[in-house]
Image (tube, coloured by chain):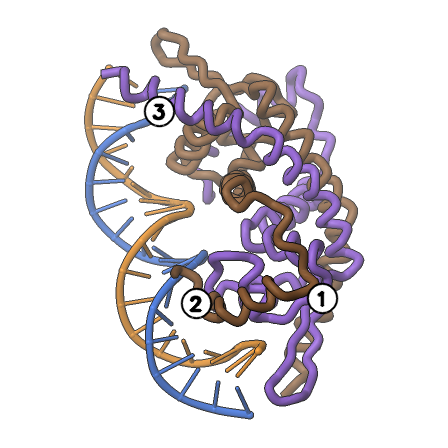
Chain colours: A brown, B purple, C blue, D orange
DNA sequence: CTGCATCCCAAAGGATACTG
DNA sequence: CAGTATCCTTTGGGATGCAG
């Protein structure tokens, strides 16, 4: 029992067995898997790397870091390893000195990029609305004494 | 200078001024704003709460926690406060005892939900592909001695 | 150049107790 | 019920040094 909010099972269960709510239309295992993916993928560095590779194609390690922005090399390494493991990017090592390692999106990575594209557009369209909302929220918060 | 990967400005700048690369088509300030939104919004708890509210409409605090899953009440509070500040949800307090606080998506929240919908679908369609990719990655990693 | 290893600090997040 | 406050542990993530 990890979730402290989950201490009402009997009541919940009874309500669920008796009541209006349909008996859960989704497979809980699949749901957990999908959630795990969402949690993994809803990560700022992952999304930023994805975006950079979508825009610039094949990119080397250091250049990738520059394009992403304020990311440490440690986080960059970690992020690309994870993305490689998930099949989002391929990592090509050219056995030369100095080493040359290139990263590029896989078809799976491109498909995620397209899926996430809607969120970028949304952010561009609504950032000012969010900004205003934050200001009014701060105002409301401060004026309640 | 926050990014240790950024120590090549002079070369970079020269290359940028001289070369093939178009002189940056985007306003850096706006880019920073959009990135901040993405970083904020590409958060697992935010996305899960968004999804729950999209599916269940108006929901009370405790019920929201149950539906989201393994979230502590501390994180739930923090997440909904932030989402309220960003204008994604509205929080309605009914002055009764025991207190009744209800959360529901704003139009802005719904629009983000729709934008992020593509990622959910992507996750459902590709989770098995990711799973297989991870397994083969682990295999490749372990067999290189 | 592209990392990995290490140390270290700050932020995320859980557990528990308490309040209106 | 819906939080806030506190304490504590875990993780994220930067800095630095070193290796192939």
Q: Secondary structure at mark 2?
A: loop
Check whether the beta carbons of the residues at disc 3 and disc 2 lie within 8 A of each other. Answer: no
Tag in front: 3 or 2: 2
Check whether the beta carbons of the residues at disc 1 and disc 3 lie within 8 A of each other. Answer: no
Q: In x, y percent, where is residue A119?
A: 69, 42
Q: In x, y percent, where is residue B110?
A: 76, 54
Query: Mark 3 = which residue?
Result: B138
User: Between B37 and B65, which is closer to the camera in this rendering?
Assistant: B65
Q: Distance from label 3 to label 2 (Cα)?
A: 34 Å
Q: Which mark is residue B58?
A: 1
Query: Mark 2 = which residue?
Result: A4
Q: Do discs 3 and 2 belong to a common subunit? A: no
Res. A77 image quadrant: top left
Badge 3, how many Cα within 10 Å: few under 14, some, many 20+? few
Task: Tell me the quarter of the image containing the C terminus of chain B.
Answer: top left
Q: In x, y percent, where is residue B6?
A: 47, 34
Q: Residue at x 48, y 67 (%)?
A: A9
Res. C6 image quadrant: top left
Q: Secondary structure at mark 3?
A: helix
Q: Residue at x 63, y 24 (%)?
A: A110
Chain for numbered disc 2: A
Tag in front: 1 or 3: 1
Badge 2, how many Cα within 10 Å: few under 14, some, many 20+? few
Q: Distance from label 1 to label 3 (Cα)?
A: 43 Å
Q: Residue at x 64, y 48 (%)?
A: A25
Q: In x, y percent, where is residue B28?
A: 67, 40
Badge 1, how many Cα within 10 Å: few under 14, some, many 20+? some
Chain for numbered disc 1: B
């Amino acid at each position: 029992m990890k979730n402290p909010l989950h201490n009402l099972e009997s009541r919940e269960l009874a309500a669920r067995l008796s009541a209006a709510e349909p008996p859960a239309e989704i497979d809980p295992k699949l749901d957990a898997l999908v959630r795990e993916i969402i949690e993994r993928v809803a990560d700022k560095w992952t999304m930023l790397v994805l975006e950079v590779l979508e825009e610039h194609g094949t990119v080397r390690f250091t250049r990738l870091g520059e394009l992403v922005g304020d990311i440490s090399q440690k986080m960059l390494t970690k992020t690309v390893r994870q993305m490689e493991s998930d099949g989002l990017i391929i990592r090509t090592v050219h056995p030369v000195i100095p080493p040359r390692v290139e990263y590029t999106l896989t078809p799976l990575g491109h498909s995620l990029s397209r899926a996430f594209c809607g969120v970028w557009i949304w952010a561009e369209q609504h950032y000012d609305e969010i900004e205003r909302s934050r200001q009014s929220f701060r105002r409301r918060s401060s004026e309640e004494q």
